[in-house]
Image: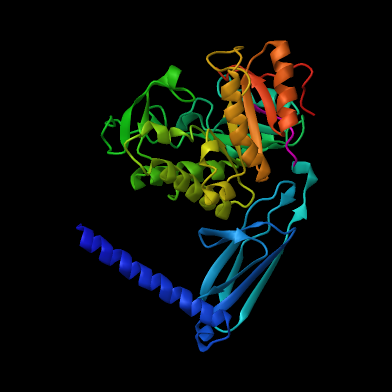
Amino acid sequence: MSIVDKAEQIAKLFVEIVTEVAKRLEALEGGGGGEQYGTLNVTTEPTGALIYIDDKYVGKSPYTALMEPDNYVVFFGDIEDYDTPEDVHTRIIAGETTRIHAIYEPNSGDTINDYMVQYGNVNLEAIGKTKYDLIIIDYAKWGDAASKWTKEQITTLQTSPGGPKKVLAYICPTMASDYRYYWGKDWRPGYPKFIGHASSWGGTFGNRFGGSYWVHYWDLDWQKIMFGESDSYLNQIIEQGFDGVFFDVIDAFWIWPNRPTAKEELADFITDMSIYAHKRKPGFMVVCNGGEQLFEYSEYVAGITGVMKESVYYGWGGDNVQTPANVTEFAEANLDRFVGAGKQVYVLNYTQTPSQVNESYRRAKNKGYINWCGVSSLDRLIVNPGHEPD
């Protein structure tokens, strides 16, 4: 496209935007053009809840907007310690105001103070005897379709003797692994076209069960495998009864330095999955590992429940190794923004040295983070002495 063509396109778009703004200003000022719009007013108790209309985040309550007459679905973001109100199906009528008032009921029993992660050697009964509030496991015992946890197994864990638990399922939306259910026998780098180069990092079970490959996560065919289809990864997890999902490696935009849009596309991808999941299961949790650098994208922040960061204090370069001070400082600066936005922040430190464990919990608590110390293989059920879950 020539520079002249681009200029004409921009000029046309500018005229359309100015025309639409003029119409809405006329409506707000009581001019005749207001007859073609209706007004939507959304309030919540408490205020400040995230408001979505159809598949788009539009702002926080109280929210008012002029809208074209049509049918809409209004749904609400999660607020910690509250039950999320049901979606509201409404119709906007020209010249009229539609008011929606949603009440969040307190649910103090859902407070998350502690958590643990385990992918290998998982024994659900043993985990159930602990008092951890949040558990992160793979969607299947061995990561494949044949060993998927059943809905009954997940329900039993959620209501286990150690106390009620939220259970999140692991997904890596930025890599494909050849032991996962979706992998085709003839798949290889470049085929399908969204399969990129091999990763030296094997993923949850990669070191034991085969290779993993970076994917073009902006490719719609890959995205359909992750969500949107009846048999998609995310749909399976929702049907299994999980309380949410743990998205891993949400900093993989750096893998594609020659794609200027890679960072924004990753934020959009996660946002779309978050909205999709929330609409199908209100209160569905979305925790992202490594996505703290996506804070600049407001819709991404609005859609997720929280973030995780590994090796903030210990584990940088190996278990029981102290993380360099400058790395810790950089990580905390990014995580603090999410704390300020009211999001949950989890830190995972790879150490079992008692003094380091104590230091991790102390520093995390002072920052408002939820800490757990484990081993990098993530194949052990660990309760850290002196920091037992309550």
Check if residue 115 falls in the magenta segment: yes
Q: Which residues are magenta?
A: 111-116
Magenta stretch mostly in which secondary structure?
loop
The residue sitting at 40% across, 45% down in the picture is: 223
Image position of 302 with respect to 87: above or below: above
Residue at x 47%, y 34% (from the top left corner): 251
The quadrant holding residue 363 is: top right
The residue lying at 43 percent from left, 45 percent from top is: 264
Q: How many numbered dots are placed on residues in this image?
A: 0
Residue 226 at x, y percent in the picture = 44, 42
Q: Is residue 194 above or below residue 197?
A: below
Above or below — where is 309 with respect to 241? Answer: above
Q: Position of residue 271 (x, y in %)?
A: 50, 48
In front: 339, or 235? 339
Figure check: 238 above or below 91: above
Rendered location of residue 151, percent (x, y)? 60, 39
Image location of residue 179, percent across then percent down: 40, 27
Which is more toward the observer, 159 or 71?
71
**Would residue 132 be visible to someone looking at this image?**
no
Q: How is the image coloured?
A: rainbow
Q: Which quadrant, please, contains the N terminus?
A: bottom left
Quadrant of the rendering where the C terminus is positioned = top right
Taking the image as drawn, is residue 40 in sight? Answer: yes
